[in-house]
Image (tube, rainbow, N blue to C red):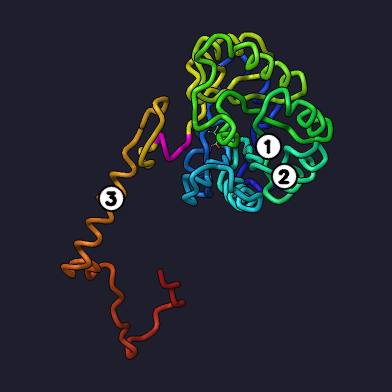
Amino acid sequence: MSAQSPVPQKRITAPEITARKGGEPIVSLTSYHAHTAAIADPFVDFLLVGDSLGMVMHGYESTVPVPLELMVMHGRAVVRGAKRALVVVDMPFGSYEESPSIAFRNAAHIMKETGCGAVKLEGGRRMAETIRFLTERGIPVMAHIGLTPQSINVIGGFKTQGRVRNQWAAIEEDAKAVAEAGAFSIVLEAMAEELARKITAAIPIPTIGIGASAGCDGQILVMEDMLGLSPRVPKFVKEFGKVGESIRNAISSYATEVRNRTFPAPEHTYAVKDDAAPAKGKAKAQT
Ligand code: KIV
């Protein structure tokens, strides 16, 4: 490699995330496109191409209708944008539940087509056999329990889990089952703090909380939610920015300036070149 070649960035791997259990908190965000992936890349350990993109980017009411190829398309963009963070792509509803071999076929398709380093799927004990099947065949799997949005039609909506103590044993069993099956980490979504702490202490893989308290090994938020770009956010979201307001102000100023003809100004306008002037050196590319 020549002295001027940039040093290639080493990408974080799934086993490196597992090794962070109990250590410095793991930082992650969702990302759906190349530019935001590139901006977030230096600050996060992994980026999740979540199927929440169906609701956030495509206006679906839930994540249930999201097709596999939409995940592949956004997954490719995020892998192109992020050079350092592990990229995890969600397996959408209907692409993995039927059998371990169908799950393998679709997970392998996602990995080959996007270049991502892992997939995520929802479910506890019922998905343990599939998680084992995938990990034994070279596919790192992140599990996801608690509120599992792909099951809202069974749960009856986006409902917090484990607020009643008699629900805890089943959720703890789910966490242990996916850890034993080989998941490299697990998302705990919208559950009571005490339960999240209990699970985090009980399993050897990192727990990534979203609405599950600081008692988890790491945190994830939907990027648009924490940027202040989403019209409505759940209670567990902290808005770290006001990007929605900033976009609204910028578009409003643009519309005003177009209407009162102050934009485009002379500095945004090309002048005619004098044909008679002698050419100076090589022509410069137009910018
Ligand atoms: O789809 C998604 O964005 C997710 C996160 C909320 C964990 O699964």
Q: Is residue 223 magenta?
A: yes
Mark 1 to mark 3 CA distance (whole Å): 35 Å
Neighbourhood count class around disc 3 (C-alpha, 10 Å): few under 14, some 14–19, many 20 upward:
few
Q: Residue at x 60, y 34 (%)?
A: 151
Residue at 76% across, 35% down: 139
**On the rendered structure, is 155 left or right of 59?**
right
| Quadrant hosting ligand 1 | top right
Q: Earlier in the sequence, mark 1 or mark 2?
A: 2
Q: Residue type at mark 1: give it.
A: Val
Q: Callout 3: helix, strand or loop?
A: helix
Residue 101 lies, with reference to residue 238, above or below; the image says below
Query: Gap in Å between the C-alphas at discs 2 and 3?
Result: 37 Å
Q: What residue range appears in magenta?
A: 222-226
Dot 2 surroundings within 10 Å: few (below 14), some, or many (20 or more)? some
Question: Is label 1 in contact with label 2 (beta carbons under 8 Å)?
Answer: yes
Tag of residue 248: 3
Of callouts 2 and 3, which one flags the residue occurring earlier in the amino acid sequence?
A: 2
Q: Which residue is mark 1?
A: 119
Q: Identify the residue at horizontal 68%, vertical 37% (top origin).
A: 119
- Rendering coords of residue 95 (x, y %): 70, 44
Q: Amino acid at mark 3?
A: Arg
> Who is closer to the viewer here, 228 or 117?
228
Is most of the magenta stretch helix, strand or loop?
helix
The reply to whether residue 244 is visible in this rendering is: yes
| Residue shown at the point (68%, 19%) measured from the top left | 174
Outermost residue, left direction? Answer: 260
Tag 1 secondary structure: strand
Residue 114: % across, % down: 67, 48
Judging by the rendered image, the residue that carries numbered circle 2 is 111
